[in-house]
Amino acid sequence: MNTIKGIVGSIKKDRGGSLYTIVADTPTEIFTDAELDIYDYVEVSFDGQSPASAIPVVKDESVKVLEKDGRQRYLEMVSSIHKKRLGVSSLFKDGRFGGVLNAMADRLDGAAKLFRTAYLTGAPMIIRFHSDGDGASGAIALYRAIGSMGARGGISWRIHKGVAHRPEALHDDSAFLDRWTSAEKPLILLIDFGTSKEGESTLEIKKEKYSRICIDHHIVYEGFPYEKFSFYINPWLAGGTSDLTAGTVAAAFAERLCGKGMRELAEISMISDHSVYAAGTDELRKKAFVLDAVTGFNIFGKTLSQLTPKYLDGLLADNERMDEIFRTSSAKMERLIDEGIGRASGYRSSLGFKVFVVDFSRLDKETAEGIPSGKYSSSLQDKIESENGPAVTIVQNRGSISLRCSKDIAGKAKILNMIKQMELSYDFVLGGGGHNEAASIRVATANSAEAIEALLEHLEANKRD
Ligand SMILES: [Mn+2]
């Protein structure tokens, strides 16, 4: 007979009973038909044989006279859990970006403490990560950290398309989170997205109801209400840039949580996001490519909900499957790139670099199937750059236009400024954003040719200032 004593930290009512998280030295989940409340102090006995609903639970009534006493005892228990030190991280000593991570250390530790408390007390969690190699590496790092904190349920991982946490997504999150009652607020964590005008409204809704952490590295625009997050962590607020990837910051966060090294995932995220800090072996490059392909190309027969960090982490360890994905997707991509370069219209800008324009919607349908034009534009840009030197690549796919710009000329081309100017100047521009090296713009499909003309004009106009 195994007995634990602890405090009820969360409850999810179900048919036939309730799922409780008991906060103790190691948090324990039990399913029982006993009626318990948050902060109840209980003794649970497991004989390893009885069905879950027959687990004997003895309530200690001596303290639960006033709710504040129950809360007090709970807080003492939580603070004893925290005596276990948060881990130290080697990424903070990295010569390339350690300084920026150190400048974010207080926020990272605060967020890690909030996350750890929510984790160990059974608060439900939604973890959303951007659907690319960067977002996926960050999610895998966190998944590994969680693995070392003891298994628990009530965590939903969601791969996320786009850069905004929109009201529809929040609605889904609420439907999941609101099934629990918990001592700590339910937690929403966003990795590699969330700095977006279109997501601002979700920061207004029920802001007292959820804890929210955002780990992002997209540029913070003026007026973005980041103070509405419990913790908003972004290198742009700490003297860094987007080159410090969200995956690397999430890896540092994960290291702080569990004390295990996450360097490999940080390196993969920097390769995937074309960071200036990207370095690494062929093996890491392959992993980055495979994560990008499997999260970005819709050709592997996986639905979005199947792309969990558990699956992705398993994939990184499965050499055979990785080879297969690498071969299939790189062959497909190479064919599409050759075709694009053959059909590109290019010219030399008076600013001194080449500009290439490719119409994605006219490429071979079968080869292009399942490959998003944004991913395509990054690979195309790499190839063009390696053959022509610094360049700007514009890929037009009906109303959606992707722009890519070599690092060396990003300061001259200023594509992000250009997109902002266009948003102000043209009604048919529906939105846009990104980094100076990689950005996108959405326009009304009927005006897409006009939009390309305007883009090229604005690119030239940059030389005036
Ligand atoms: Mn990223």
Image: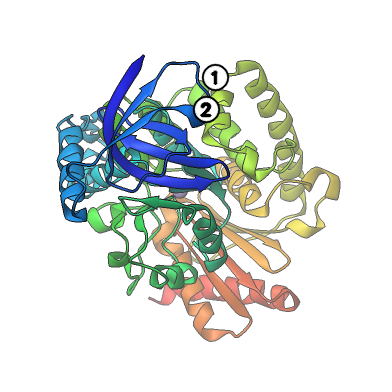
**Mark 1 closeness class: few <14, some 14–19, many ≥20 residues within 10 Å:** few
Q: Residue at x 38, y 38 (%)?
A: 21
Q: What x and y, as percent, mark residue 270?
A: 42, 38
Q: Which residue is mark 2?
A: 313
Examine the rendering and report whether any part of residue 228 can be seen: yes
Mark carried by residue 390: none
Task: Judge from the rendering whether residue 295 lies leftward or rightward of residue 61; answer left or right.
Answer: right
Displayed quadrant of residue 117: top left
Q: Secondary structure at mark 1?
A: loop
Q: Position of residue 58 (x, y in %)?
A: 32, 32
Q: Mark 1 — residue?
A: 317
Asked if residue 211 lies left or right of residue 68, the reply is right
- Given residues 208 and 437, the one toward you in this image is 208
Q: Quadrant of the C terminus?
A: bottom left
In this rendering, does residue 389 appear at all?
no
Q: Mark 1 belongs to which amino acid?
A: Ala
Residue 25 position in % (x across, y down): 25, 28
Tell me the colour scheme of the image.
Answer: rainbow
Q: Nearer the viewer, residue 251 or 427?
A: 251
